[in-house]
Amino acid sequence: MPNNLPEIIEQVKLSLGAFVPEISLSALFLLVITLDMVLNEKRVVIPMVSLVGFVITGFFTWQQLDMPNQEYFLRMHVVDPFAVFFKFLFLGAGALAVLITMDSEELGEKNVANIGEYYAVLIAMVLGMFLMASASDMLMMFLALELVSISSYILTGYLKHQIKSSEASLKYIIYGAVSSGLMVYGMSLIYGLTGQTNIYEIAKFISANEVDEVTLTLAALLVMGGFGYKIGAVPFHFWSPDVYEGAPTPVTAFLSVGSKAAGFAMLIRFFKVAIPAEPTGELAFDWVNFFALIALVSMLLGNFAAIWQSNVKRMLAYSSIAHAGYLLLGVLVADDLGTQAVMFYLAAYTVMTVGAFYVVILIANKIGSDDVNDYRGLGKRMPLTAAALTVFLVSLTGLPPTVGFIGKYMIFTALLGKGTVFLTLAIIGVLTSAVSLYYYFKIPLNMYLRESEDGAETPMESSAFANALAAFLMILTIGFGLFFTPLANFAKNSVIMLVMN
Amino acid sequence: MTLTLITFLPLIAALITLLIPKEQKQTIRLVSLLAAVGQVILAVVIWQNYNPSLAGVDDVSKFQFVERAAWFSVELGGYTVSADYLMGIDGLSVTMVILTAIVALVGVGASWTIEKSVKSYFVLYNLMSMSMMGCFLALDFFLFYIFWEVTLIPMYFLIGIWGGKNREYAAIKFFIYTLVGSVLMLLAIIALYASVIDPETGRNTFSMVAMANQQNFISGSALAPSEGNLLRALAFFALFLAFVIKVPMVPFHTWLPDAHVEAPTPISVVLAGVLLKLGGYGLLRINFPIFPEVFQQFAWWIALFGVISIVYGAFCAIAQTDFKKMVAYSSVSHMGFVLLGIAAVNSLGMSGAMLQMFSHGLLSPMMFLLVGVIYERAHTREMDKFGGLAKHMPVYAGFIMLAFMGNLGMPALSGFVAEAFVFLGAFAVEQTRLLSVIGTLGILLSAAYLLRAYKAMFTGERKPNAAYEVEGHHGEEHAHFHDWKGKVDLDGREIALLAPLAAIVIIIGVYPAPVLDLIMPSLNRVAEILSAAANVAMK
């Protein structure tokens, strides 16, 4: 590492070329804040500007595909296909979040006077996720994670006059603060053990030197606290039902896909790079078995606890815990196939989860409730949206012909043939997904099998734009379920992660 | 193109239906009818052009009407996963395809009286019809699995929306039961893919045809046929569970009475006529040829559970007072013969099983149609709420008699041929001899519950608490059901639905050769595969 100032400045200058997407997002953030101050009519212009900004950032991100895999900014920041894949995912999720926010009455003029800041914070959150996917230094990891976390606290509590929203935000902050604290403590232990903060240097040190196993295990467990909180896996999941329920639904949707994906990006990079398998196949800290345990408990608890929920947002919160479990199954395989499966699954999960939350928003706009018992008779009253929601739920269950099925298929393909423990996990995985059918289908059950209490059958269709967006996501869900080759190949080409020799 | 067309005609009908305004109920019905008639015509074309001398099973060049197109090829980590759109027909599937087309058409006819949300109903009905047909035609396991799972979703809604009082429970029970079976199948499919190569291309394959040949397994792979490979047994049972839940085999049968009782008549027809056969077909096409030595090991147990299903199902049927429930349990009992026949591991027993599937696929739709007729008129299915119906509904009583006789194995009807073959096959083998003797008890018991039902409902005098009234002087009484406006006896539509089924039942009973000619070469091949594995096991 260079010590004199001119050299450092020189390095930073060189690195700027690799930072264009992030710079573009920062510029967008400033632009939105400025527009928020000068404009009177913001409800259309600012989202549109944000979308255009995302598209431009997408273009810059696309250009990064050709860049050499390298570390930048004094080894803080990595550009490699792995990071680029996730950046596209965050941009997609961010754009969808903007689109579904525009349609939400919860965040409409009646409830929220100033929406400009909302989009600014959302953009900041996307920026934080970009940094999470690229961070190669523990310090950077922590900063990026905090940027995402703090933005999400603000968004969760955005409905200031609603107690539930504020309560959710407060709970989120408390859990978040504790998790971050644990994580920083773990990182400091690792620094104490190895004298390094760069994950590549940590890996080098661990493989070259004898480190105290107990301390390393403790440190890794603590670090996992921070990651586990972001991905919403048991036992770091306690915040999610309350936050999912209390937060404005578009925010819930974005948290459940964006935050989770970012958490997985960082987790995969950290554990695969910093604690890689020795040539003998041994791990300095046995994170594979540790993840196996977390995945197992997440799948069981998430799916079984969801059975008793009647609030759709809470139900989806538990389902997201279960999905964190399925995703961890892909992570713990620790080979390229597993990583590819996780990446594909996250993309699939984004489409179907945002779709599901979007329909929940549309329904809440009309009936003002998130309770599944109030969904009665909606199949007749909102035929298209109800059908779309059913497709998303079928996909979340993992049934063909949907993208969720292909995602599960890939995860289980990665698991099989790797030994008895993995086979057992796969069997539990498929059986719990059969359990998940029970609660997911409570929603179609109410929409189609039951009549509304007052017998109302008047149609309540949403706007043409809303229908088009829901139909688009529904077509994506089925389309990628039958013709998934491009997405799978993109994921395949993106598993390449910068690895030190 | 024939197979693609026969599979996706209902899908086209479903898409067209989506475009028709929901008020035009008759147009919607006609579109579905047209598609179903189209399927039957195509089925006849297939039947006429089918060359029975080709066996199929484990040789793709001996399949007919084969259609093959690359579907997807995805790099997953180290290896490529590719699936084909591979469809084809051999002796195992040809009768099932014909049966599916017939039953689907009858089902459309039986759906004519559905008035609730006609548009959604026929969209779902056609989706289900498409996926059933696809299951019998797909030779690529991945494709098969998609069709297999897609049958569940429309079925859930068809039972759940148009069903009886307890429909929510029945629908989700059906869905979860069958899903538990099929998710395990998914794992078996993944493992099979990794273990089998296509001899033509030398790459891993989902082709069930390649899987049926033990030579195509990669030596040393997870499911390679080798001494004491526990994983093979596990995979066998994963598939087995999926199929026997569908059959259904006792003790996995409990979804069936609920689903049948709650389902509307046409859905019961399709459920009993075709969906149950998917289980038997899966065993014959997939489970046994792919894992012949595991099957050999457990053949006696499978026969045992077959016999338990026969006897237990029959006893349950005896205990019922609800007509439809009795018919549902008799389905459990009669599908037990399929298991017993297959487990005999000779071509006689297996041809009996196949015939039984075909025969039951005709008789059980008849029975459910007949139950539907009386339920529509009287709004009750309690058998002791009638009495003396034969006098007032002679045509109805005639069809009931025929269906009952067919079901209890009366000679000259299809049920007799099938069950006789099953018993002869099972008796010929030392290990299942005793079981086949016990199995004959099933026939005795079915005579008991069927004749008792007939006696209760049709003979004697009208019971005091009967669900119909009689007016008029002695000698020229008229029966009527209190709010039923239609004909008391069967009307034209009902006869048109029942008569063709009855005709086929009689024809096969008298002259089963056409069906046997179709199925025997393929069944002989399956029997060869199975007994070859037995010989290896013996050594």
Image (cartoon, coloured by chain):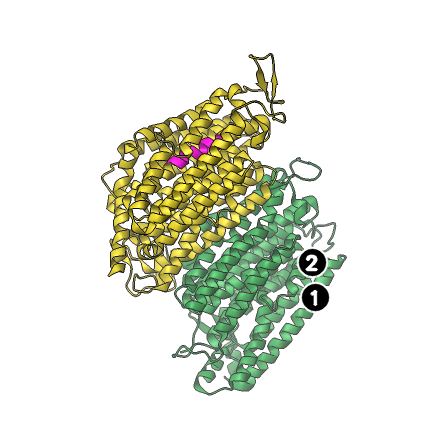
Chain colours: A green, B yellow
Quadrant containing the C terminus of chain A in the rendered view: bottom left
Disc 1 residue type? Lys
Left or right of A491, for residue A6: right
Disc 2 residue type? Gly
CB contact under 8 Å: marks 2 and 1: yes
Q: Please give the range of residues in magenta.
A: B359-369
Q: Chain of mark 2?
A: A
Q: Confirm whether circles 2 and 1 share one chain.
A: yes
Q: Is residue A465 above or below residue A164?
A: above
Residue at point 46%, 52% (across, down): B181
In the picture, residue B469 is in which quadrant?
top right
Q: Is residue B240 visible?
A: yes
Q: Is residue A55 above or below residue B484?
A: below
Residue designated by label 2: A246
Magenta-colored segment: predominant secondary structure:
helix
**Near-viewer residue (A299 or B395):** B395
